[in-house]
Image (tube, rainbow, N blue to C red):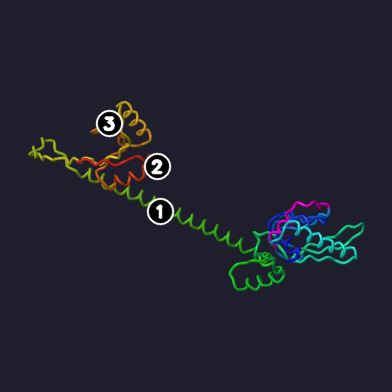
Amino acid sequence: MSTAAYIEELLYRYNCVVVPEFGAFLTHVKSAFIDKTGHTFYPPSKVLSFNRQLQSNDGLLISYIAEAEKTSFEDAQKELAKTIKEWGKQLEKGETLILQNIGSFKPAKEGKLIFQPSKQTNFLTSSFGLSSFVSKPILREVLKEEVEVLEEKVPFIITPEERKKHEIRPLLKYAAIILLALSAGFTGYRTYDRAITNELASQEKAQEIISNSIQEATFFDTKPMELPVFRVDVTKKVTKKRHHIIAGAFRERGNADRKIAQLRNKGYDAFYVGQNKFGLFQVAFDSFEDPKQALKVLKQIRVSESRDAWLLSVK
């Protein structure tokens, strides 16, 4: 395997690969970007550069070559030195040195090198499989023509030119709404006035009938005949509310009384239920005869007042 191939493999793993007595290849991460002139989208990548000043041997490249070729460090170092010497002779002749998948070197004045990295290789492993692509530019005029054709088929206006032609439409719409509201108002007022007039006429007619009835009544000066008295015993049906929504149970009666006052201030028909088997004083939000109504109110209280409220049903 060539030296350039070993350098390429190391650039995927490290940000700096030093070639002794030649220079160092450096990488830094570049975010995804868009080339607006060419309408090209580029994924995140590692930008490759070359520094001629870094030539000290850090042992990384030589150790990697020795391990890959199953040879000693000294032998790998000698082979690398030969390769670098051949690169130097090629550049001294003014020729371009091409390292496959890495880039190319061109000699410049005063022994300097111009490095051009390869655009075909992305050394960022997290972007493996991602490549650049070109997006077709959006032609505004063509899109406008398509929209104008669409306007002829749909019942609403899209382009500014067509909206200017139909500026009178919103005004007519608002005028129609106002006229309809005024018409409905007058109609409602006339209906209300007619109802009030009819009610007053009915009251006057009823008053007249009552007056005539009083005038036609016959009054007796004699003592009226005593009528027998009938007594009817009516038993009042007493309903007992047996379903109580409990707000809390208290060890002290004073705390229970304060809770009742607090709930009554909030509008509840709170009352003292009594002591339970544990000797606690129970206070209820309200009490109901119908269990379904009690459950309905309980759900409302749990949402608005207390999630700890519960239903106590007694026989």
Whichever of callouts 2 and 3 sits on the residue coming sooner in the sequence is 3
Residue shown at 83% from the left, 52% from the top: 53
Q: Which residue is mark 3?
A: 280
Magenta residues (range): 53-69
Q: Is residue 45 visible?
A: no
In the rendered image, residue 1 lying in the magenta stretch gets the answer no
The residue lying toward the viewer, choosing from 187 and 156, is 156
Which of the two discs, 1 and 3, sits closer to the camera? 3
- Residue 65: which quarter of the image? bottom right
In this rendering, is residue 209 above or below 270? below
Residue 8 image point, x, y percent: 72, 62
The Cα–Cα distance between marks 2 and 1, rounded to whole angstroms, is: 45 Å
Of helix, strand and loop, which one carries label 3? loop
Q: Amino acid at mark 3?
A: Leu
* Residue visible at 37% across and 31% down in the picture: 262
Task: Tell whether 188 sits left or right of 120.
Answer: left
Foreground tag (2 vs 3): 3
Q: Amino acid at mark 1?
A: Arg
Please name the residue that numbered disc 2 is placed on. 304
